Image: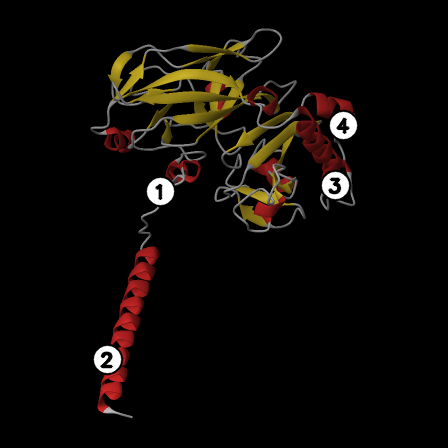
Amino acid sequence: MNSKFKLFLIVAGVVIALCLITLLYVSLTCNGNAEQGITSSTPDPTNTAHVDAVVEYDFAEDVEKAAVVTEQNGKFNNKNVLQYTYNEENDTISIGVNIGESSDAIYINLQSSAANKDSPVGFYLTTKNGYLFQYRQEHGSTQELLNTGIYNILLGRTYDLGNSSEFKDQSFYGSMWTNDVAEGTEISVRAINLSEENYGQLLTTFRIIIEYDAATESYSIVDAYNSDVSTTGDLSVAERQRLVEDAVDFVHNTDRNSRAIMFDNVSRDWDISITNAIVEKVPMTYFTKLYDTSGNSLIRGKSINYELFAVSFPLQGFGFVTMYYAPALQIIGLQNPYEPGSTDLNLELYGYDAFYPFSQDTLDSAGFNAE
């Protein structure tokens, strides 16, 4: 081996060693950034971290927190009051308040025209982006609200806990939405019948659209519409029908449902359940925890990042039950919901909510834990 060849081997070895060291450094740097949550990728707007900031069941205690969030981030215009008609009787739900521009948040102010002493209406709210706050009143009991003449109620985890959904002023605001980035949102709403006769009946589901106008740097409520897939077109008529029939079958079929014994008082009239079913595409499960198809495993509903569909239908004695469907590929852990070359979501039952949420006692008696 001559000296020139030896020199070549030495130089080549040094170059290779330097490359390996560089690669190792880059790898360690990237891993370190990943562990700290640092990423250069564009965030997925359907999986925003803002969702985790939604106050769903625990009411915001400090109004100042909302003021900090909205600081120096445009105007919140509260000028549009919308009327959403939700049944054949032309009952409406009023949305928004007219107090002018440059407010500190968008005030939701949900009020049903049908709400009264005998038929109070409860509301569950979740948001796709941004932050929802509810004014925390001293009592937090639905019955105490009814005793004071308040019949539009923001519900807590169960129907017996709540606060007023009505806006009085910017100190007693009911519910409000705000954001710390320049983007609007969709607020998903479920309206629940709290009358003695139909306690727990799901009246309607709808979405409130809040848009951000970059030209004026302002947010406004611009639309509200029924969120059933028959309106939005998220599923075909045939796909919707299949999900409803499968959900009803799961509830009534002991071979599929290990908790079927809990449905002793369930109406056997499938036509009623199918006719009154509500199916909507949802950004997250209605509650932060739900049950898998075995009825035993408690899983975190809020962290799901699926093409998720909620099927809700009435159950005699239980109000309503909600079953969740997701693409089979995503259930087994894949990100893409479609098989190669296919446009079929191939939706399968993923899990269901703890039903009968009238109070903590009713959840406990049915074998569910509300925490």
Q: Is residue 260 left or right of residue 73?
A: right
Task: Provide the residue designation for mark 4.
Answer: 267
**Colour scheme of the rendered structure:** secondary structure
Q: What's the residue type where badge 2 is placed?
A: Val
Q: Which of marks 4 and 1 is in front?
A: 1
| Coordinates of residue 36 in the picture (x, y in percent) | 31, 55
Nearer to us in this view, 62 or 44: 44
**Mark 4 and 1 residues: CB-CB less than 8 Å, in contact?**
no
Q: Is residue 241 left or right of residue 113?
A: right
In the image, residue 89 sits, relative to residue 142, either above or below, namely above
For numbered disc 4, what is the local secondary structure? Answer: loop
Between the residue at mark 3 and the residue at mark 2, the CA separation in whole angstroms equals: 74 Å
Nearer to us in this view, 340 or 86: 340
In the image, residue 234 sits, relative to residue 41, either above or below, namely above
Please tell me which of labels 3 and 4 falls first in the chain: 3
| Coordinates of residue 335 in the picture (x, y in percent) | 52, 47
Q: What's the residue type where badge 1 is placed?
A: Thr
| Coordinates of residue 34 in the picture (x, y in percent) | 34, 56
Q: Is residue 174 visible?
A: no
- Residue that lies at the very extreme toward the left in this rendered image: 72
Q: Is residue 95 visible?
A: yes
Please tell me which of labels 3 and 1 falls first in the chain: 1
Between the residue at mark 1 and the residue at mark 2, the CA separation in whole angstroms equals: 41 Å
Between the residue at mark 3 and the residue at mark 4, the CA separation in whole angstroms equals: 13 Å
Which residue is drawn at the image coordinates 77% and 26% (left, top)? 270
For numbered disc 1, what is the local secondary structure? Answer: loop
Task: Provide the residue designation for mark 2.
Answer: 11
Task: Provide the residue designation for mark 1.
Answer: 42
Task: Provide the residue designation for mark 3.
Answer: 260
Q: Nearer the viewer, mark 3 or mark 1?
A: 1
Give the numbered dot on residue 152: none
